[in-house]
Image (cartoon, rainbow, N blue to C red):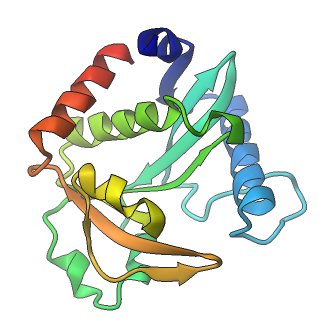
């Protein structure tokens, strides 16, 4: 059943102008209308502040973007604004990759989309020689991130109505179980 559900999705980097536009509409629906984190630009689109340096991984279902996760490798990282001691980032092994601005259509949130996007980002990070992945994880999902191997870089920070924990995943310390899970998903992608 899992394999059948997975096959309905394609996971890749956004390549076409249409896919990029769909990403910006999804970000708008998610972070302006549904979970208000950004002011409404009045355009129906939300352009991420790191857009020029982002690589957008997307989940495609029935020819449409239904999920996205962006990555970039700096030199500025949004997670830095959530860390009181900025030297924490300087102590991490380089190079760093930040995964951010994760959005999934509301009716697809509890399926395979997160796993497919997370696996795509992991594969990209490993194949491109990154040492650490940075995130600002929701405090209420901290346990999930920690099971994946992420470790806090500082205390939670309140942003809007939610608390976010600045976290890092050292790619040399990914557990055997997480690797098994990622390999299983890789075979299905």
Q: Between residues 123 and 182, which one lies in front from this camera angle?
A: 182
Q: Residue at x 66, y 30 (%)?
A: 65
Q: Residue at x 14, y 46 (%)?
A: 174
Q: Is residue 159 left or right of residue 27?
A: left
Query: Can you give x and y, in whole percent of width and height, for residue 128 in the image?
Result: 23, 40
Residue 154 placement: quadrant: bottom left
Q: Which one is nearer the viewer's eye here, 114 or 172? A: 114
Residue drawn at 16 percent across, 49 percent down = 171
Q: Is residue 92 above or below residue 54?
A: below
Residue 45 makes an appearance in the image: yes
Most distant residue in the right direction: 42
Residue 24 in the image: state x and y as whole percent.
Answer: 71, 47
Residue 69, compared with residue 87, is above or below; it is above
Can you give x and y, in whole percent of width and height, for residue 177 in the image? 16, 36
Residue at 29% across / 40% down in the picture?
Answer: 122
The C terminus appears in which quarter of the rendering?
Answer: top left
The quarter of the displayed image where residue 52 is located: bottom right
């Amino acid at each position: 059943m899992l394999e059948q559900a997975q096959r309905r999705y394609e996971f890749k980097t956004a390549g076409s102008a249409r896919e990029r536009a769909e990403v910006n509409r999804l970000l708008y629906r998610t972070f302006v209308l549904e979970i208000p984190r950004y002011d409404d630009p009045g355009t129906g689109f939300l352009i991420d502040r790191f857009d020029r340096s982002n690589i957008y991984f997307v989940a495609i279902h029935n020819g449409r973007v239904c999920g996205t996760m962006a990555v970039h490798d700096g030199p500025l990282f949004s997670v830095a604004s959530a860390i009181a001691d900025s030297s924490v980032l300087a102590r991490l092994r380089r190079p760093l990759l930040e995964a951010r601005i994760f959005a999934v259509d509301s009716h697809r949130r509890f399926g395979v989309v997160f796993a497919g996007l997370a696996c795509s980002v992991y594969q990209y990070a490993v194949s491109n020689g990154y040492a650490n992945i940075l995130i600002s994880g929701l405090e209420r999902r901290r346990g999930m991130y920690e099971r994946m191997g992420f470790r806090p870089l500082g205390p939670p920070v309140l942003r809007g109505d939610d608390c976010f924990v600045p976290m890092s995943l050292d790619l040399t310390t990914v557990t055997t179980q997480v690797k098994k899970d990622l390999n299983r998903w890789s075979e299905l992608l």
